[in-house]
Image (cartoon, rainbow, N blue to C red):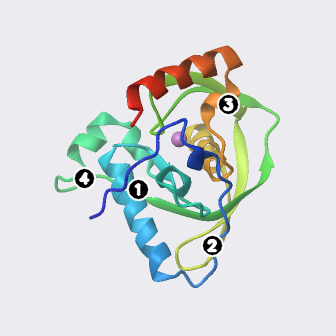
């Protein structure tokens, strides 16, 4: 099990636009997927994009069950729940005009949460680790989580949707807290 370091805003690597992955997956990319999952569960988080560990490839993992503290607490018990999803080269084919607002947070922007409005429903095309193409519609928390994760692959963070004043305040405080 390899826990990778999660980059914290304002790290320039978080602003990189990630490249598409080619199939069949190389051993490096297979390892990357495993590391992303291990790192997400360890954090703990409900999603992690490659960009967040400094690898600019279009790969992300999610487990929206991990929103629940009870699920996290019991994950390693018999009957513990996990629902790991791997998203490779994801692309939104459609987004609804209807918007929905959720309070978002991010492992790369620790300790800050803010309301962000995003399309309430999306249609997504993506590939799984075997290279099989999928297409499906998502709504609710899942739709929001996917938009948040795939923003990372384009070098975008949820704080980019906030006012410049609020964003600058968060950047300043994180710089002070995490400066290395
Ligand atoms: Ni994030």
Q: Position of residue 149 (x, y in %)?
A: 58, 47
Q: Is residue 126 left or right of residue 67?
A: right
Residue marked by disc 2: 21
User: Which mark is on residue 160?
Assistant: 3
- The numbered mark, 2 or 1, whose residue comes first in the sequence reads 2
Label 2 SS: loop
> How far apart are the two marked residues, 3 and 1, measured between alpha carbons?
29 Å
Gap between marks 3 and 4 measured at Cα: 36 Å
Q: State the residue lying farthest toward the left.
A: 77
Q: Residues within 10 Å of mark 3 (few under 14, many from 20)?
A: few
Q: Secondary structure at mark 1?
A: loop
State which mark lies toward you, 3 or 1: 3
Could you tell me which secondary element the residue under label 4 belongs to? loop
Q: Please give the name of the residue rendered at 20% of the width and 53% of the height, measured from the top-left corner.
A: 76
Q: Nearer the viewer, mark 2 or mark 1?
A: 2
Name the spot of residue 158 as percent of width and height, x first: 61, 33
Query: Which disc is residue 83 wearing?
Result: 1
Rendered-image quadrant of the C terminus: top left
Looking at the image, residue 7 lies above or below residue 132: above
């Amino acid at each position: 099990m390899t826990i990778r370091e999660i980059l914290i805003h304002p790290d320039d690597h978080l602003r990189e636009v990630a490249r598409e992955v080619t199939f069949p997956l190389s051993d490096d990319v297979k390892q990357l997927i495993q590391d992303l999952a291990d790192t997400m569960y360890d954090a703990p988080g409900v999603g992690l994009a490659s960009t967040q560990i400094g690898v600019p490839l279009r790969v992300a993992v999610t487990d929206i069950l991990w929103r629940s503290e009870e699920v996290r607490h019991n994950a390693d018990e018999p009957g513990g729940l996990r629902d790991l999803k791997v998203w490779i080269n994801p692309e939104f084919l459609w987004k609804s005009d209807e918007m929905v607002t959720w309070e978002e947070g991010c492992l790369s922007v620790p300790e800050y949460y803010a309301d962000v409005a995003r399309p309430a429903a999306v249609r997504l095309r993506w590939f799984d680790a075997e290279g099989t193409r999928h297409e499906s519609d998502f709504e609710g928390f899942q739709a929001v989580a996917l938009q948040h994760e795939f923003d990372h692959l384009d070098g975008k963070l949820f704080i980019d949707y906030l006012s410049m004043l609020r964003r600058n305040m968060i950047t300043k405080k994180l710089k002070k807290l995490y400066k290395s």
